Image (cartoon, grey):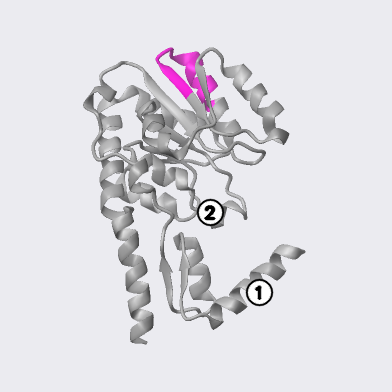
Amino acid sequence: MLLPLVERLDLAMARRADAVTVTNSYQENKYRRAGVQAVRIVGNFTPPACRIARIDPSKFQGAETRFGRFGTFFHGVGLEPAAEAFRQLRAARADVELFLGGRVLKPYQRAFDDQVGKLRPSVNILGTYDSAMTPDLYARIHVSLLTYPLSRFYRHITPLKFYDSISNGVPVIMSDIGGLGQVIRTHECGFVVDPADVKGIRVAMDRLASNRELLRAMSENALAAADREFSWERLERACCDTVAELLQG
């Protein structure tokens, strides 16, 4: 009952604004459909201190493929399908590992422990971390698992973890939220999956674990996309252009 009211109020206020900044194409299209003309995407990109300039070639020398997910874990964040896909993949091949790092909210702790219990001993729990550790965390993994639900809530979200992943040369296996599906396809920096399709997630994981050249290419594509399209320099230009257009008007 409350959400539709908030959404109507949001659109009413947006129509009165000189400009609206958003973080993804879904939001951009929503405001444009509502008659807001001055809409600009200003993403929540990864800070320079939390990204890398180049990928260490030695990362691809081992036979093992390391999957991971970092962030806050809670009910509805979409960990379960990725965990089950990894469990099935691990049952078929021994050269894969899973890394999980971040805070677990208290109401979700028991469910989190249940998921982890099914994956031992091939899962590594890294616990909470500081943002300054971001490059070191992503250096440990080859692929980021971002299987967020396709819910009404998540369609508004552009996860920082997507930008953290590609800014550290880590391709993603991700659900199509916040307009990021098209970004992933355009830049060939991962696979777009249905978060409810465990088999599809497992197949995507297996493809990257089975093809070192594909994994390396997608890793390079991810970092190149971050450099060209999703850097703080690009963010700075977007903010300055928005202000300049308003001043000219």
Residue 224 position by quadrant? top left
Q: Residue at the spot x=32%, y=72% of the render? A: 241
Q: Is residue 97 toward the left or the right of residue 221 in the image?
A: right
Horizontal side of residue 242 vs 71, given as left or right: left
Name the foreground residue: 90 vs 145: 145
* Up-down relation of residue 139 to residue 50 (above or below): above
Name the spot of residue 22 as percent of width and height, x first. Answer: 47, 64
| Rendered image quadrant of residue 134 | top left
- In the rendering, at what x and y percent does residue 110 appear? 71, 26
Classed neighbour count for the residue bearing mark 1: other residues with Cα under 10 Å, few (<14), some (14–19), many (≥20)? few
Which residue is rendered at x = 52% and y = 72% of the image? Answer: 31
The magenta span reads: 85-98
State the residue in front, 31 or 87: 31
Count up the numbered dots.
2
Q: Which residue is mark 1?
A: 9
Depth check: give the residue in front, 90 or 107. Answer: 107
The C terminus is located in which quarter? bottom left
Q: Is residue 246 magenta?
A: no
Q: CA distance from mark 1 to mark 2?
A: 19 Å
Residue 190 seen in the figure: no
Query: Mark 1 falls on what kind of element?
Result: helix
Question: Of the residues under marks 1 and 2, which one precedes in the sequence?
Answer: 1
Q: In what quadrant of the picture does the N terminus appear?
A: bottom right
As drawn, is 139 to the left or to the right of 36? left
Q: Residue furthest right?
A: 1
Q: Which mark is residue 157?
A: 2
In the structure shown, which secondary structural element does the residue marked by tag 2 occupy? loop
Specify whether residue 86 is painted magenta: yes
Residue 140 visible in this rendered orientation of the protein: yes
Residues under numbered marks 1 and 2 in contact, where contact means CB atoms less than 8 Å apart: no
**Three-letter code, disc 2:** Ile
User: Above or below — where is 26 with respect to 182?
Assistant: below
